[in-house]
Amino acid sequence: MAEVSERESWRRAERRRLIAHRLALAPEERQRCAAAIGKNLTELLAKLSGATVGFYWPIRGEFDPLPVAERFGKAGRVIALPAAIAPDAALEYRPWRAGDAMEAGRHSIPEPRERRLVQPDILVVPLVGFDQGRHRLGYGGGYFDRTLAALSPRPVTIGVGYEAALLPTIYPQAHDVALDFIVTEAQLRP
């Protein structure tokens, strides 16, 4: 039991450290990273098939994927954003286009107001941290973990974050599922 507690303490501390690091990026460094991540993500999405792509609304210094989402939406793909409907539930995905009516959801994160549900074929998720095994360290609420466990068929998963968020391990838990791809400003990890 003490080992689990130590690992959870470590994960909490790493979350705080990594979020503080990305929030402290100088504006020009953030722009440079965003351009490179956007390029790498765009190239990967162009190679993947799937009519519906789930993205996320950026918070706390995360890479902003919405310009990439808009580009693929204009190209004919259905773009969706998550909505957190309950603390211990999977996220639901709702279609989204720039200019759609939004409302503050749980944790004050904007989500599409219209509750029309879609299932993503491809899911782009934010990373607080990640390891070489493509395991994702998130904020600790378990929303994306529950979502990945609930979606069937399982979508292609793409984690998006900064290269500085690479850790030797995240000490994966039983519910942590390896992502299919990790995209950073430095590279794409298949």
Image: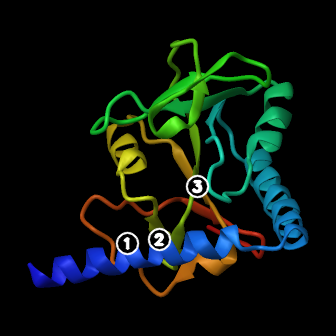
**Separation of disc 1 and disc 3 at Cα?**
17 Å
Q: Are marks 1 and 2 in contact (CB under 8 Å)?
A: yes
**Separation of disc 2 and disc 3 at Cα?**
13 Å
Residue with the mark numbered 2? 15
Q: Residue furthest bottom?
A: 168
Residue shown at 64% from the left, 76% from the top: 21
| Left or right: residue 90 compared with residue 132 | left
Using the image as rendered, state which of residue 15 and residue 170 is in the foreground. Answer: 15
Residue shown at 61% from the left, 67% from the top: 190
Q: What sort of colour scheme is used for the picture?
A: rainbow
Q: Mark number for residue 126?
A: 3
**Separation of disc 1 and disc 2 at Cα?**
5 Å
Q: Quadrant of the N terminus?
A: bottom left
| Left or right: residue 48 compared with residue 122 | right
Residue 149 vertical position relative to residue 112 in the rendered view, above or below: below
Using the image as rendered, state which of residue 16 and residue 129 is in the foreground. Answer: 16
Q: Amino acid at mark 1?
A: Arg
Residue with the mark numbered 1? 12
Q: Earlier in the sequence, mark 2 or mark 3?
A: 2
